[in-house]
Image: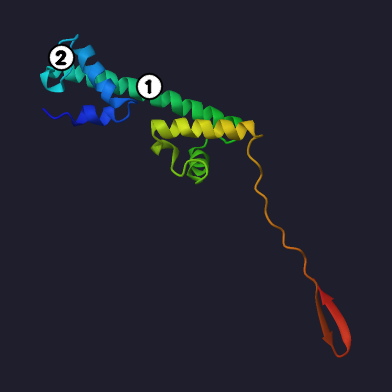
Amino acid sequence: MSYARFYTLLKRVHNADEAKVDLVSQFTHGRTTSLREMTPQEYDAMCNILEERLNWMLRKKRSLVLKLMQELGVDTTDWGRINAFCLESRIAGKPFAKLTSNELEALAVRLRAIIGKGGLKAQKHERHPQVEVCFIMNGKIRAEA
């Protein structure tokens, strides 16, 4: 039996080594801590529950980040604007849908810091000072802006 499904899910869990032992023991009712000694039914049940739990946590983190973006004035009804905001290198550097659980946590911290400092600032555009050019033609001075 291939355990790729389990290890893919396990990568998304904090303290993966401890979690593996605990999960296997829990789903075998303490019979074993080895994946190889699990029945296919126990393995499938464990992976299904783990997928559901991780997806629920990911949805919860996404919802929190969207709420924080909304507080900053980002139009969260427009995925184009959400992605444009997230693509900014100082925010996340990637589209919202591609953010991992850990990246969403880090983004939430970053957004709270921005809120704590007064929110987003309007981008300043440098104005070029008007330059006056003077021409001397036929002994007369002519100025242009």
Does residue 51 appear to the left or right of 145 in the view shown? left
> Helix or strand or loop: what does disc 2 sit on?
loop
Task: Identify the amino acid type marked 2.
Answer: Thr
Q: How many marks?
A: 2
Task: Identify the amino acid type marked 1.
Answer: Trp
Q: Are marks 1 and 2 in contact (CB under 8 Å)?
A: no
Q: Report if residue 51 is visible in the image.
A: yes
As displayed, is residue 100 above or below residue 136? Answer: above
Task: Give the residue drawn at x 39%, y 34%.
Answer: 100
CA gap, disc 1 and disc 2: 27 Å
As displayed, is residue 1 above or below residue 140? Answer: above
Quarter placement of the C terminus: bottom right
Q: Position of residue 67 (x, y in %)?
A: 54, 27
Quarter placement of the N terminus: top left
Residue 43 is labelled as: none
Upstream in sequence: badge 1 or badge 2: 2
Q: Report if residue 77 is visible in the image.
A: no
Q: Position of residue 54 (x, y in %)?
A: 34, 24
Return the residue at label 2: 32
Task: Give the residue drawn at x 44%, y 23%.
Answer: 60
Return the residue at label 1: 56
In the picture as drawn, the residue positioned furthest to the bottom comes out as: 138
As displayed, is residue 49 above or below residue 58? Answer: above
**Residue closer to the observer: 33 or 142:** 33
In the picture as drawn, the residue positioned furthest to the top comes out as: 29
Where residue 29 sits, quadrant-wise, is top left
Where residue 18 sits, quadrant-wise, is top left
Task: Give the residue drawn at x 23%, y 19%.
Answer: 21
**Residue closer to the observer: 47 or 142:** 47
Where residue 142 sits, quadrant-wise, is bottom right
**Residue closer to the observer: 8 or 140:** 8
Q: Position of residue 88 (x, y in %)?
A: 51, 45
